[in-house]
């Protein structure tokens, strides 16, 4: 699945490059919606960037934005302790408080670290208890972000078919996720139904990344705080290998749910160039572990970034 990266040249047309990247993704079992934007010039290139997909754990980024904004307004206290019930999860994947066996008392700001950097579902839901999904969406609209909608808390992401199968049968849950959708993006799995799930488009996630890097509606302190968390994100297996280096700064967030594999981030180069990258994918392969798909996502995004960097 490690397809060779295309080498953009002045003679490579954008349409031809998009077709080739789309083919490579399809050959690797991925349907993708992605967008790469040059944050200095506004030039962009992508594949189906206006198609909405369930957000999975990407939703923790707007949750962080909303929470930091409410802290800035004085509606929440960053140091206020919150009592959090243990998640006691035993399935493969969850992190942090979601796996705790005993109750914990944690400050709001530390919950933000756990939610964003460790993608801790229990920490995220403790924050959603303070700022419900509808309020998060309302704040996004206030900041001019219209393609991301937050409808439910994160605990619903841990109530999917995969939790009801024996680990050896996880492929059956992924097969259901792949096959049970409708042409209108409805789905028998509620978390994958775009009329009921948290959703966003690659363009909207890119707009949010741009606002975080160069805020116009967001307060600069809020944008800086969220960027700082994304810089310390520990789940970095998808796009990071293709964008992190000694000559770049890369801040990002992943999202995973059944057959969905997402990552959004910004790469900042030492020469001042910066690119927002949003990659949302659906795997057509009924398997939980797909490191080749993660690598292919990074290769596709890097190829499109390289094209923008050389045109």
Image (cartoon, rainbow, N blue to C red):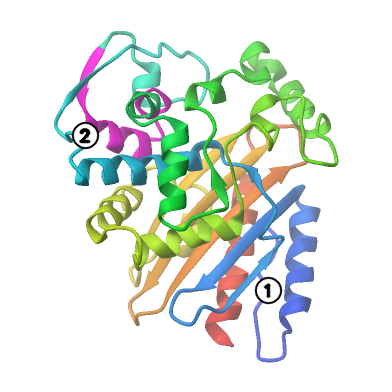
Residue 84: % across, % down: 29, 16
162 vs 262: above or below: above
Q: Which residue is drawn at 59% across and 18% down?
A: 159
Q: Which of 81 and 110 is in front in this view?
A: 81
Residue 17: % across, % down: 73, 75
Q: Which of 307 and 208 is in front in this view?
A: 208
Asked whether, in this view, residue 41 is left or right of residue 167, the answer is left
Res 157 → quadrant: top right
Res 83 → quadrant: top left
Mark carried by residue 76 = 2
Q: Which residue is drawn at 44% across and 60% down?
A: 209
Residue at which label 1 appears: 6
Q: Give the range drawn in magenta.
A: 104-124
Q: Magenta segment: does it hold 243? A: no
236 vs 123: above or below: below
Tell me, yes or no, whether the two marked residues, 2 and 1, touch with CB atoms within 8 Å. no
Res 56 → quadrant: top right
Q: Which of 225 and 5 is in front in this view?
A: 225
Query: How far apart, in angstroms, are the residues tagged by discs 2 and 1?
Result: 48 Å
Query: Which residue is at the far left?
Result: 79
């Amino acid at each position: 699945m490690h397809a060779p990266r295309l080498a953009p040249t002045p003679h490579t047309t954008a349409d031809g490059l998009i077709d080739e990247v789309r083919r490579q993704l399809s050959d690797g079992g991925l349907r993708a919606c992605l967008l790469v934007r040059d944050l200095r010039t506004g030039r962009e290139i992508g594949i189906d960037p206006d198609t909405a997909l369930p957000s999975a754990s990407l939703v923790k980024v707007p949750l962080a934005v909303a929470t930091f904004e409410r802290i800035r307004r004085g509606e929440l206290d960053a140091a206020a302790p919150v009592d959090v019930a243990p998640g006691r999860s035993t399935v493969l994947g969850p992190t942090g408080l979601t796996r705790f066996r005993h109750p914990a008392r944690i400050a709001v700001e530390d919950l933000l670290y756990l939610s964003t950097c460790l993608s801790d579902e229990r920490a995220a839901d403790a924050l959603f208890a303070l700022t419900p999904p509808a309020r998060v969406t309302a704040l996004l609209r206030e900041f001019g972000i219209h393609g991301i909608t937050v409808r439910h808390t994160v605990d619903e992401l841990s109530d999917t078919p995969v939790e009801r199968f024996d680990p050896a049968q996880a492929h059956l849950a992924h097969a259901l996720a792949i096959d049970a959708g409708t042409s209108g993006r409805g789905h028998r799995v509620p978390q994958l139904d775009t009329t009921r799930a948290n959703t966003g488009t690659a363009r909207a996630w890119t707009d949010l990344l741009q606002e975080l890097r160069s805020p116009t509606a967001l307060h600069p302190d809020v944008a800086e705080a969220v960027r700082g968390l994304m810089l310390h994100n520990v789940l970095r297996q998808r796009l990071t290998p293709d964008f992190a280096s000694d000559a770049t700064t890369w801040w990002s967030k992943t999202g995973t749910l059944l057959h969905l594999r997402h990552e959004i981030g910004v790469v900042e180069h030492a020469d001042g160039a910066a690119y927002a990258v949003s990659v949302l994918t659906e795997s057509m392969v009924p398997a939980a572990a797909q490191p080749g798909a993660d690598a292919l996502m990074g290769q596709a995004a890097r190829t499109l970034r390289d094209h923008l960097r050389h045109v």
